Amino acid sequence: MGTLTQTFEQIQVALDGAHASIYLDSGVTAQSIANGASYVKSTGFATNGNSSNMTADVANDKITATVAGTYQVNISCSFIGDTNNTNWFGAIFVDGVEQGNIHFQRKIGTASDTGSANASGLVNITSVPVDIDFRLRHDNGTAENFTAKYLNLSAHLAGQ
């Protein structure tokens, strides 16, 4: 008979998986994004979603991965911009580092229009714990308001 080489954590993850989400439903609060030159962490999340073997942390607007592996990370949002012809850019960050493969760009043509955008991709996490968050910027030189109506950040372990 063979020897069991998996740790308890690996067995638990194999049985339960690893996933988490944070979200906002019917938001009305605007977040001011300074001059658009740098990404700013979204603070619009309001509710911890389901989680297993990861930490959903709506108080800090992030998800924490606690198991090494490859993760599918998704961001979807519906939002209002307050200035005509402003391009909004969204990106996923892992431990403060922009992920080049998980971005979106959405132009708001008319002030107070509601637009939707999403992005999805894989990230390889080799050392844990790490934080996953959503950040945004715009192409206008002055402060702009981002009002998230619906916002969902989710991650799940796709493989180890």
Image: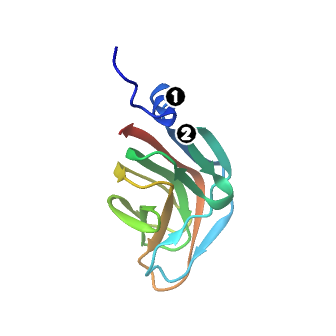
Q: Is residue 40 above or below residue 103?
A: below
Identify the element where label 1 is drawn.
Answer: helix
The answer for how far apart the CA atoms under marks 2 and 1 are is 8 Å
Which disc number belongs to residue 53? 2
For residue 112, what is the image quadrant?
A: bottom right
Q: What residue lies at 46% left-to-right and 79% top-to-bottom?
A: 36
Q: Position of residue 31 (x, y in %)?
A: 62, 69
Q: What residue lies at 42% left-to-right and 31% top-to-bottom?
A: 6
Circle 2 Cα neighbour tier, 10 Å, few/some/many (<14 / 14–19 / ≥20): some
> Given contact means CB atoms under 8 Å apart, are the residues at marks 2 and 1 in contact?
yes
The N terminus is located in which quarter?
A: top left
In this orientation, which residue lies closer to the viewer: 10 or 154? 10
What amino acid is at disc 2? Asn
Q: What residue lies at 46% left-to-right and 51% top-to-bottom?
A: 75
For residue 79, what is the image quadrant?
A: bottom right
Identify the element where label 2 is drawn.
Answer: loop
The C terminus is located in which quarter?
A: top left
What amino acid is at disc 1? Asp
In this orientation, which residue lies closer to the viewer: 52 or 13? 13
Compared across the picture, whether 127 is left or right of 153 comes to left
For residue 32, what is the image quadrant?
A: bottom right
Quick one: which residue is furthest to the left in this view?
A: 101
Colour mode?
A: rainbow
Compared across the picture, whether 152 is left or right of 104 comes to right
Which disc number belongs to residue 16? 1
Q: Position of residue 85 (x, y in %)?
A: 42, 72
Q: Position of residue 39 (x, y in %)?
A: 46, 73
Compared across the picture, whether 150 is left or right of 99 comes to right
Circle 1 Cα neighbour tier, 10 Å, few/some/many (<14 / 14–19 / ≥20): few
Q: Position of residue 143 (x, y in %)?
A: 55, 81
Q: Is residue 44 above or below residue 65?
A: below
Dot placed on the residue nearer the N-terminal end, 2 or 1: 1
